[in-house]
Image (tube, rainbow, N blue to C red):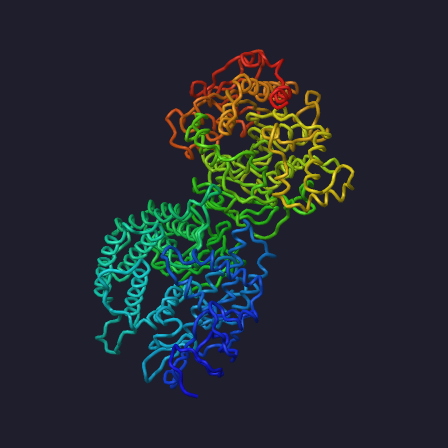
Amino acid sequence: MPKVAKGRRQRAYHPKTRTGCLTCKKRRIKCDEVRPACLRCTSSGRVCDNSYYVQPPCSMRSDMVSVVAGPSFDLHVHVSPESRRSFVFFMQRTCPQQAGFFGSDFWERLVLQTAYHEPAIHYAIVAIGSLHELLERRTVIKDADKVFAFEQYSLAMRDLLLPITQTGERGVDSIQGHHALAGAHIRSGAKLLREISYHQSKGITQHQVLGSKRDRDCYVSLDAISRMYARMCPDINLINGSNKFELRERLCSDTTSDDVPLTFDSVEDAKNIFEYYRALFISSQAAPQSSSNSVDSPAVAKPDTRLFETLMSKYSLALQAYIESKSPYFTPMEDIAMAVLQLHVLGSYLSIYIELSPPDKKASWEDFMPQIKKMVQLSEKVLSTTSPGNNRGPKTFFCLDMGIVLPLYTLGSQCGDPTIRRKVIALLRLTSRQEAFWNSFLVAEAIERIMEAEENVLGGRNECTDGPDQVRLVSIEPFLGLDGNGGWLRHILRGELTLSFLVARTDPVVLFVARMDPVPLSLAALPGQSDCRPANSAQSERAPVGQIVETSSGSVAGRPAATDPEVSEYLGIPYAKPPIGDLRFAAPLKYAGFSRLNASTFGNSCPLKPSSGTAPTPAEIAASNITEVGLELITTISSPEVVYSEDCLYLNVWSRPQSGEPQKAVMVFIHGGGFTSGTSSIPIFNGAALAHREDVIVVNFNYRLSILGWPGNPTTQNNVALLDQRLAMEWIRDNISNFGGDPTRITLFGQSAGAASTDFYSYAWSSDPIAAGIILESGTTGLYPANSESVSAAAWYNISVALGCGDASTNSTTLLACMRNVEVDSLLGAIPQTGVNALLSAFGPTVDNTLIFSNYSQQTPASIPLLAGNNDYESGLFRTEFALSGETLPDSVWDAYDLAGFNCPAGIRANASLAVKNPTWRYRYFSVFPNINISAEGGAWHGAELQLLFGTTYLTGNDTAEEIDFEKYLQGAWTAFAKDPVNGLKTYESGWPLYNPAKKTLIRLGYGNAVGTNLASPILYDASCANASLSNLITSIFG
């Protein structure tokens, strides 16, 4: 058959055709060459490579000597719908993250195209897409969710021959999490390289599928494969503990010029050239030196830094020229990419220069403080752009390209300046970053261990070792585990001492080993093998930040809080089984978990009643007199962008375990929202600042809302949201001691509907409240008059009829099953949004005389201390919200609402507490500060105290001096009550008087924005309470 010119279409079928897709070529069938995917592949469920395959000329296939024999594998990739979905997700969502900020087509083109020819890479990509999608859909990936991904990894590993098996490959069957994502690609890249053959007579390299170096039409250039391998080499070395692969980084880069260009075409181009010249220099230094047995031969060749300095000087000039000419036109992504690149250039320069400096003039990191500070500034720039996340907190960052964790690890482990080290640790803990095998939290802990070792061991003698008095770290070898939870750092010390210790999210374990022999230690065998501890063992026994805590929900791994890195933050811990399916509208069931939970992000928020209106118009905004702060608070901060799901029963814990009391008082907060809205992840409720400043543990949680929490079904339990709250309290009682909390000093407090819930709770479980004290902020049982069973039942049946599930005459079991099968959006969307339902939902607490009572004057609350109060102008919030929707009500209505909904019920509840001889305090809040003022008429509005209490006023502007003083006073008062509910306030500052309705014992907080107790007689505000009725007021407004 005549030879067909390259690139032209083969008209007649023949098994040796040179055009068409590679899949058809392998199957030895004729390809119809339809684009973007041939019909023969798509009709049979196979993946088409979307590219012409060009067969290397025969002359390039002769006399080939394989470097390492490649595996035989089947290129027939049968694609299931689930595989296709995960592959598409990888292309659309995962690739941009993996490519970092360089706008590189490395992952988005090279790896994807290679996947069409390499089943192993295809399987790995499917697994990555599957895991990534799970990560975005939920906070915790359960073992059942990982089955499909692990199946794909198994297929990938089956087809991948590892080039590092002879040097101790380990643990591939235990791969989990993001480390597996990096591992799969590392092995894929290594496999491609090991299949490259070298043509001895021609002096060229070639791959059996990808073509040869001289074949300009080859599918993927070997230069690109070389870059893939070069980027993966550090990770291969990391898990292998060897520099074996560094020497081959230039394998396919012989066409790259040995001279640095005057400038670059792009940030990606600058990055590739930097990688090449770094590898060029390292290879030149690592090349074997000629030696002689002569006694005159030097024992060690003196390192030559001239080549390195020349390369770096030229590269720096070219990079600076590129920045000066192109930086005004950088996109935000390119700007961050350039910062990352500069960080790596500086880090490489310092590392290599210091390593190669002559022994008699040995340089140290402290000699380069300007460059070090520049590295820190570049890292801050990257983090400030990539880590803010959204209102749910800092987002997790994942990338397989070069990032900031490795340079920061090098800086933190090598630079001896404690200020720099602490700054590096804080940056690493700002958010969870996974860059290939480098995890920011793990690296931060490693640096802390290095500092601890130097401070406690290396500065003097230690009875556990026989080492010299003064020893120094001379090398650090990291071995990070593949499971994402820990690893090893082996530090070689002068004085023939090896310090090996575990770096893991567990209690510190330190082992000292004599001499320099590496010690094979397993993670399971380490605890208890040595009694040696650092000199200050008492301090080291205190829990580290973000330590793993054992709970009834499983092992929980926390993180340093983004705003207070010394605070351990545990987010999204499940305390109940997901209330879905048959558990919708049912009492919650206790969650029992046994796996490890990554508690670094908030759990899902409970679905809430849809908004009853649209966004306010500019005219409505102007007419409402709302401030910019008020608009932000009402429309953004209090309504964060969160994931809503019925699987929402999660709680959050903030603690500072390494200081203060070993068993701290616990403050449990219930959020408000009228029983129809709200979530624990609202930024205002972040407990880190309060935990840090006042040495308490702060906990908050989600509970079911609206019809899901207060269904009104006459045949089932109606008040399941209150049962959610009780189950959360039981979880806290049973587990809080493991976080450093005192289960006998739990204070339950809430605001608005959260305060009403707290009050309902104090009556429902009066004999076993768990709490040692309660605080009611602007809410009591009188704030939301409970529905009668008939009213709630009518609301329930209105919804069931609207959804086609039946009415009161329908079989109750059938109706309930139907309501449990309705989509949650449809269920909530059927709730009326007009009339009284626009203000107070028909679905709220229902009288059952077990949890919710019809007449609280005849009930006895729990015998525990009480702090209760309200704000001076609660209606300031509601009238502003009404104005934003274009509605207005007379001032008299708002004054009556203040009186009947907040002030008078607070007095009634305080009197009920006094009746059973409970220590009782009552307050009225007055403070108004610019950065939390919502409108000209807002005053001390409903919820104004919350940002001051939680220390989150920074969300809406800078504090004034008097605001700072008052914030400390308010936080001190609440925590004094929590630490000692009986006597704490009696001795706080000048002392708070116990409440007496006949005396000046009403504490006016922030009166004139002043610190301290301004006392008034309760009658000053309660004189009109006899005529106040919230039910009558609502009826008069809505009819």
Rendered residue at 43%/72% (across/down) = 192
Task: Between residue 813 and residue 394, name the one nearer to us.
Answer: 813
Quarter occupied by the C terminus = top right
Q: Is residue 469 visible?
A: no
Residue 592 lies left or right of residue 168; in this view the side is right
Residue 709 lies left or right of residue 364; in this view the side is right
Residue 460 lies, with reference to residue 714, above or below; the image says: below
Residue 471 lies, with reference to residue 703, above or below; the image says: below
In x, y percent, where is residue 75?
A: 51, 74
Name the residue furthest front.
11
Rendered residue at 46%/26% (across/down) = 624
Occupied quadrant, residue 787: top right
Residue 789 lies left or right of residue 217; in this view the side is right
Task: Between residue 980 and residue 603, name the one nearer to us.
Answer: 603
Tally of numbered tags: 0
Residue 556 lies, with reference to residue 654, above or below; the image says: below
Name the residue furthest bottom.
1
Task: Between residue 870 and residue 222, name the one nearer to us.
Answer: 222
Rendered residue at 52%/63% (across/down) = 126
In x, y percent, where is residue 477?
A: 39, 60
In x, y percent, where is residue 281?
A: 28, 66
In x, y percent, where is residue 709?
A: 64, 37
Quarter occupied by the N terminus = bottom left
Q: Is residue 214 visible?
A: yes
Residue 757 lies, with reference to residue 77, above or below; the image says: above
